[in-house]
């Protein structure tokens, strides 16, 4: 059975679930093949209106009509959501909750559950997520391929060992917030230098986008690309010198490591 023929259910219909639903619809999944369980009325109403999918407060009803279940509630709410899910036999579970281990997910889902753990990021809302996925004890290669297909619909997906998912959380899961700060700070610098806010923000965002595309498409090391921009005695090396004195690279490394450590601690609670 192809992905477009399968029934996909969501436990939760918040921002990340909505981003995935948007990607699946653009991929070719029909709205009739998607359902969501959502208790918060504003989120439920938004999903109905925007996507035309079936939304209910009854998780068991979503499970009953789905082949694949994407767990998109907050980590603290997973056990409660699964406890009201009814008969979960022969379902593929894909969790996008940070820090909740496959072992815990399998325990909560029961019935020798087939579990995939995934870590997308907020850029899924514009179909540009970077997602790491890991398969559980009972998940098959076919299950992993289905998960890869789902998350490839909203960006780039990579299968990795679960022991590296905390690192993925710290890097690509939390990373957009770090990049947003870079864009904001660069735009502030542009405003300080005389640009209006709108122009500065657009130029800063496009500059980050263009640099990212260069790294991905060229395959050249970012340090080498940086050197290409730094003319001897020029303006760029002057700015790079400031970043080095302010330990910008060390700060970003520490931010990723701190976020990864937090994800690991969440998994031990």
Image (tube, rainbow, N blue to C red):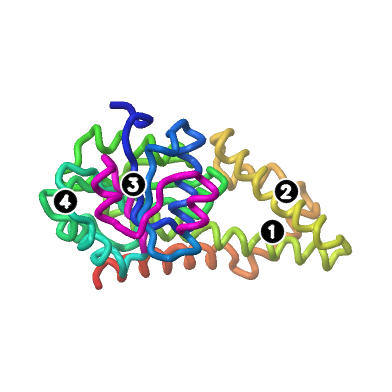
- The residue furthest left is 111
Which of the two discs, 2 and 3, sits closer to the camera? 3
- Residue named by callout 4: 87
Residue 7 locus on image (x, y percent) = 32, 38
Quadrant placement of the C terminus: bottom left
Q: Nearer the viewer, residue 57 or 106?
A: 57
Residue found at x 24% / y 65%:
79
Q: Residues within 10 Å of mark 4 (few under 14, many from 20)?
A: some
**Which mark is first along the chain, 2 or 4?**
4
- Residue named by callout 2: 230
**Which mark is first along the chain, 4 or 3?**
3
Residue found at x 67% / y 43%:
210
Whether residues under marks 4 and 1 lie with C-beta atoms below 8 angstroms apart, the answer is: no
Up-down relation of residue 103 to residue 50 (above or below):
below
Span of residues in magenta? 44-73
Marking on residue 9: 3
- Residue named by callout 1: 240
Q: Secondary structure at mark 1?
A: helix
Q: Quadrant of residue 13?
A: bottom left
Could you give the CA–CA distance between mark 2 and mark 3, rounded to whole angstroms? 50 Å
Q: Secondary structure at mark 4?
A: loop
**Which mark is first along the chain, 1 or 3?**
3
Q: Is 114 on the left or on the right of 209, as rendered?
A: left
Q: Is residue 161 visible?
A: no
Could you give the CA–CA distance between mark 3 and mark 1, rounded to whole angstroms? 48 Å
Whether residues under marks 4 and 2 lie with C-beta atoms below 8 angstroms apart, the answer is: no
Q: Residues within 10 Å of mark 1 (few under 14, many from 20)?
A: some
Q: Is 231 on the left or on the right of 36, as rendered?
A: right
Q: Secondary structure at mark 2?
A: loop
Q: Secondary structure at mark 3?
A: strand
Could you give the CA–CA distance between mark 1 and mark 2, rounded to whole angstroms? 8 Å
Q: Indicate whether residue 67 is drawn in magenta.
A: yes
């Amino acid at each position: 059975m192809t992905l477009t023929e399968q029934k996909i259910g969501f436990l939760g219909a918040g921002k990340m679930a909505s981003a995935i639903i948007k990607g699946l619809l653009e991929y070719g999944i029909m709205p009739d093949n998607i359902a969501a369980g959502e208790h918060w009325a504003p989120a439920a109403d938004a999903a109905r209106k925007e996507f035309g999918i079936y939304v209910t407060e009854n998780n068991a009803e979503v499970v009953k009509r789905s082949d694949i279940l994407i767990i998109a509630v907050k980590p603290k709410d997973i056990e409660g959501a699964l406890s009201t899910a009814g008969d979960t036999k022969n379902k593929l579970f894909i969790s996008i909750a940070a820090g909740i281990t496959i072992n815990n997910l399998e325990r909560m889902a029961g019935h020798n559950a087939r579990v995939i753990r995934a870590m997308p990021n907020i850029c899924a809302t514009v179909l540009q997520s970077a997602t790491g996925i890991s398969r559980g004890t009972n998940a098959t290669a076919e299950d992993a391929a289905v998960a890869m297909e789902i998350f490839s619909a909203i960006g780039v997906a990579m299968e990795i060992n679960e022991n590296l998912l905390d690192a993925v959380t710290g890097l690509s899961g939390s990373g957009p917030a770090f990049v947003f700060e870079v864009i904001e700070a660069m735009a502030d610098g542009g405003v300080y230098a005389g640009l209006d806010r709108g122009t500065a923000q657009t130029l800063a965002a496009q500059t980050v986008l263009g640099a990212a595309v260069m790294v991905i498409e060229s395959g050249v090391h970012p340090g080498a690309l940086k050197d290409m921009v730094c003319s001897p005695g020029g303006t760029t090396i002057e700015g790079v010198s400031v970043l080095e004195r302010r330990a910008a690279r060390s700060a970003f490394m520490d931010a990723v490591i701190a976020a990864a450590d937090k994800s690991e601690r969440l998994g031990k609670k």
